[in-house]
């Protein structure tokens, strides 16, 4: 028995022996072992034995008494599903039950079962007797290409049916497409992944290496980004393309078996898949084009639906033009001759005889030029070998740059486990060191190695993200990077002065975290010197100017910590005036205006720390006015309402701390209303939801401490009343519903409000 014999969890390990049971009777099949501790009943289902078990749960063979039928009962383990997953499960269960297609295994019932370990979601699914995975079935029956394509078309139609019902499978692979005793394919677990995974990205990252690689074979490039918001019906189309390739060729388009996770992800996102034409010349042409279009990296160039893919399969089977490419004249001629073979046969034979005659007269000329071609070919081969070596060098260097840069930045945003982050950095550094050993220490290699050491520094210790807090190791890596950047700068590349300044700024962070303020000032001095050299060479460089401004703010913060009020205020006022002057020079420059608004906001914070609330309010008010100007000037800018909302919040904090609590709450409520409106417009924006929760938590806490709970209760109730219709209009937006639930908890008495479950 294989994994594909029964409806199983994607990671299930199937237990038992083969059987040809028809599904009738009330005893378990041979090989469906009854194990100790197995429940005798779950709801209205009598358990007969275990079909399979895996990381996410167990699949039981069970008997339903009314109506009497054998079912596959899939139980999601308690603890494998989070609170958010259970809520998602409740939303999805009704939709899944509505799927009705002859090639989709029906879900009879979905619910939850209270076990001794907690609440377990379950699915009672159609039992498929004698089933085997679709690829295994095609190979075992030795189906011809045409029959395989007809079988595949049925799968496309079934997937399209699910999509029309608003359900994306998200885990299509041969193990989830079974063929029964009658040769009919059945898709199992349609939508079950969506109904039970609390967070696709996290679940994927936490699987074992083997499980992840197995799943990656069928995952689209956008799924590899681990952002659930990017997944749509075209992700299923990609998986169908991989399955089509496997059904026709007997192999997968990529060999990921010995690849590390990050390398496998890179291959999926960047490497062109193998061509069916390289497997067999009989599959060159249209069918190869269809498979490649289904597996396009760019979703916009992929088939836009499973129906489109099925349509092209239909066209191919009927020798009709496919939509996968433009209809060139030569292409249409090939289609015509293929469809009307007998009509064209005589003309083809005549043309062939003429061509053969021409070939005979040309042979002497070809021989005369052969020796000349050999000499030219040898020179070309030498040049190609040199070019290949250079291309290989550049490819490895480019790959290291992507892994240490974009890819690493992506997994940090996803809160990947620290050991995963370390694995990526260590592996990338190992590649670079090997490249240095083989190709010599070029400036390009040295720059990439220095960059990875900077990444390792922030991994071990930083004040700007998750890290291990091992500050000595962080300083060690920053020092290595700094030394390499210094060497590079001596070679005349002034751009490295920017990197040197960044390294000093990073070391400043470490000393700041350890309250070593004098060491902080030393690093700022060195950073100032480096960024000064950089800006001499590149005076208009935007990032360079911003780093210089940031260093000034760090110096202000340091003097504030040292309680040097005079230097703090002097530097602060100089910085504010410098940005005001910059804006006076060009009042239409949005960047200059936003820079001024930001420094004014920072000035307000400094005055708040000094307990000078009157000056803080002045700075915060001016900052708020600048942000309001920016929003009025560009209402389509999604960031502008957020900036204004937080400006209102900080102003409110200062007003309240200065003694006018009611006025302060007015300002904070204005900020919350802006965030509320932004959240309604951008219902899938995580930042918008996070801002609401952050500000709402502070508002509710301040209201409670100042005995204003009645006021906050009324405001929050109005907030929720406005937000609730958004959830009702889009019940599958679980993150938005979760935000609603968390805000709702701040109510003193939520009984009179319609609760979203």
Image (cartoon, rainbow, N blue to C red):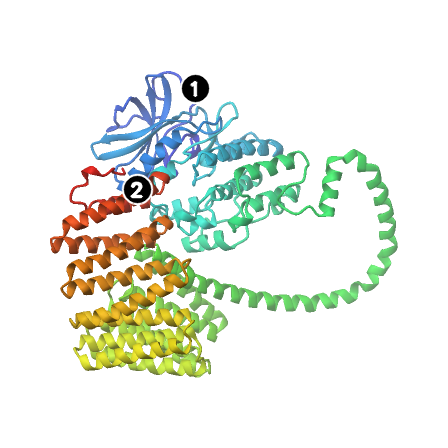
Whichever of labels 2 and 1 marks the residue nearer the N terminus, that label is 1
Q: Mark 2 points at which residue?
A: 724
Q: How many labels does the image show?
A: 2
Q: Where is residue 308 in the image (x, y as percent from the top left)?
A: 57, 39
Q: Quadrant of the image for the C terminus?
A: top left
Bin the neighbour count of mark 2 within 10 Å (Cα to Cα): few under 14, some 14-19, many 20 and up: some
Q: Distance between the residues labelled 2 and 1?
A: 49 Å
Q: Name the residue at 31% across, 34% down.
A: 90
Residue under label 1, please give it: 22
The residue at the point 50 percent across, 49 percent down is: 255
Figure quadrant of residue 521:
bottom left
Front-lying residue, 316 or 328 = 328
Where residue 453 sits, quadrant-wise, is bottom left
In the displayed structure image, the side of residue 497 where residue 323 appears, left or right: right
The answer to whether any part of residue 742 appears in the image is no
In the depicted structure, whether residue 494 falls above or below residue 366: below
Question: Residue 545 versus residue 104: which sits nearer the camera?
Answer: 545
Please provide percent x and percent y for residue 9. 37, 36
Q: Which mark is residue 717?
A: none
Q: Position of residue 596 (x, y in %)?
A: 33, 72
Quadrant, the N terminus: top left
Identify whether 179 is placed above or below 646: above
Name the foreground residue: 121 vs 708: 708
Residue 664 vs 98, above or below: the answer is below
Q: Is residue 398 left or right of residue 749?
A: right
Q: Is residue 231 left or right of residue 644?
A: right
Residue drawn at x 28%, y 61% as measured from the top left = 646
């Amino acid at each position: 028995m294989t994994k594909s014999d029964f409806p199983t969890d994607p990671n299930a390990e199937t237990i038992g022996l083969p059987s040809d049971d028809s599904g009738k009777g009330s005893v378990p099949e041979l090989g469906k072992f009854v194990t100790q501790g197995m429940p005798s009943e779950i709801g209205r289902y009598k358990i007969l034995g275990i079909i399979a078990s895996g990381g996410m749960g167990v699949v039981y063979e069970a008997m339903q008494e009314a109506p009497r039928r054998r079912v596959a009962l899939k139980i999601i383990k308690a603890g494998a599903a989070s609170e958010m997953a259970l809520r998602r499960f409740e939303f999805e269960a009704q939709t899944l039950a509505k799927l009705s297609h002859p090639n989709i295994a029906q879900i009879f019932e979905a619910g939850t079962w209270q076990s001794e370990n907690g609440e377990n979601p379950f699915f009672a699914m159609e039992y498929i007797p004698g089933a085997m995975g679709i690829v295994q079935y095609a190979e075992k029956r030795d189906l011809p290409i045409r029959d395989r394509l007809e079988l595949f078309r049925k799968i496309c139609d079934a997937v399209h049916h699910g999509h029309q019902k608003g359900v994306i499978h998200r885990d299509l692979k041969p193990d989830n497409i079974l063929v029964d005793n009658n040769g009919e394919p059945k898709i199992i677990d349609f939508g079950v992944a969506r109904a039970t995974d609390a967070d696709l990205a996290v679940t994927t990252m936490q699987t074992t290496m083997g499980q992840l690689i197995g799943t990656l074979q069928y995952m689209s490039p956008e799924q590899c980004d681990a952002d659930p918001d990017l997944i749509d019906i075209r992700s299923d189309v990609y998986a169908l393309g991989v399955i089509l390739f496997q059904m026709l060729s007997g192999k997968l388009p990529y060999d990921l078996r010995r690849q590390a996770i990050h390398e496998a992800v890179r291959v999926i996102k960047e490497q062109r898949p193998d061509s069916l034409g390289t497997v067999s010349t009989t599959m060159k042409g249209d069918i190869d084009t269809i498979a490649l279009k289904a597996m396009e990296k760019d979703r916009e160039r992929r088939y836009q639906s499973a129906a489109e893919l099925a349509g092209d399969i239909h066209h191919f089977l009927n020798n009709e033009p496919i939509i996968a490419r433009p209809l060139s004249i030569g292409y249409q001629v090939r289609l015509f001759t293929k469809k009307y073979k007998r009509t064209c046969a005589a003309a083809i034979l005549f043309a062939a005889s003429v061509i053969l005659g021409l070939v005979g007269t040309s042979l002497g000329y070809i021989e005369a030029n052969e020796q000349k071609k050999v000499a030219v070919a040898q020179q070309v081969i030498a040049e190609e070998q040199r070019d290949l070596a250079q291309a290989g060098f550049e490819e490895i260097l480019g790959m290291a740059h992507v892994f240490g840069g974009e890819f690493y930045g992506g997994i940090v945003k996803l809160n990947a486990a620290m050991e995963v982050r370390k694995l990526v950095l260590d592996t990338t550094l190992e590649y670079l060191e090997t490249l240095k050993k083989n190709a010599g220490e070029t400036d390009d290699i040295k720059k990439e190695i220095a960059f990875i050491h900077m990444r390792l520094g922030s991994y071990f210790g930083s004040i700007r993200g998750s890290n291990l807090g091992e500050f000595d190791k962080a300083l060690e890596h920053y020092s290595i990077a700094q030394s390499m950047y210094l060497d590079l700068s001596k070679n005349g590349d002034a751009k490295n002065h920017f990197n040197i300044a960044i390294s000093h700024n990073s070391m400043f962070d470490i000393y700041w975290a350890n309250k070593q303020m004098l060491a902080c000032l030393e690093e700022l001095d060195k950073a100032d010197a480096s960024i000064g050299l950089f800006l001499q060479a590149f005076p208009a460089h935007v990032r360079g100017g911003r780093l210089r401004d940031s260093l000034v703010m760090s110096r202000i913060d340091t003097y504030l910590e040292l309680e040097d009020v005079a230097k703090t205020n002097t530097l602060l006022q100089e910085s504010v005036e410098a940005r005001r002057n910059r804006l006076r020079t060009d009042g239409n420059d949005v960047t200059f205006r936003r820079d001024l608004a930001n420094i004014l906001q920072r000035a307000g914070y400094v005055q708040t720390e000094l307990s000078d609330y009157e000056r803080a309010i002045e700075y915060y008010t001016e900052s708020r006015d600048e942000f309001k100007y920016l929003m009025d000037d560009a209402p389509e800018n999604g960031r502008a309402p957020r900036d204004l909302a937080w400006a209102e919040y900080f102003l409110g904090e200062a007003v309240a701390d200065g003694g006018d609590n009611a006025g302060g709450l007015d300002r904070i409520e204005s900020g919350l209303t802006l965030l509320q409106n932004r959240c309604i417009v951008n219902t899938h924006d995580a930042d918008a939801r996070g801002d609401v929760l952050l500000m709402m938590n502070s508002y509710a806490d301040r209201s409670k401490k100042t005995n204003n709970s009645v006021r906050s209760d009324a405001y929050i109730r109005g907030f929720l009343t406005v937000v609730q219709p958004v959830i009702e209009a889009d019940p599958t937006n679980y993150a938005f519903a979760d935000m609603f639930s968390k805000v709702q908890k701040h109510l003193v008495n939520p009984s009179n409000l319609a609760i979203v479950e």
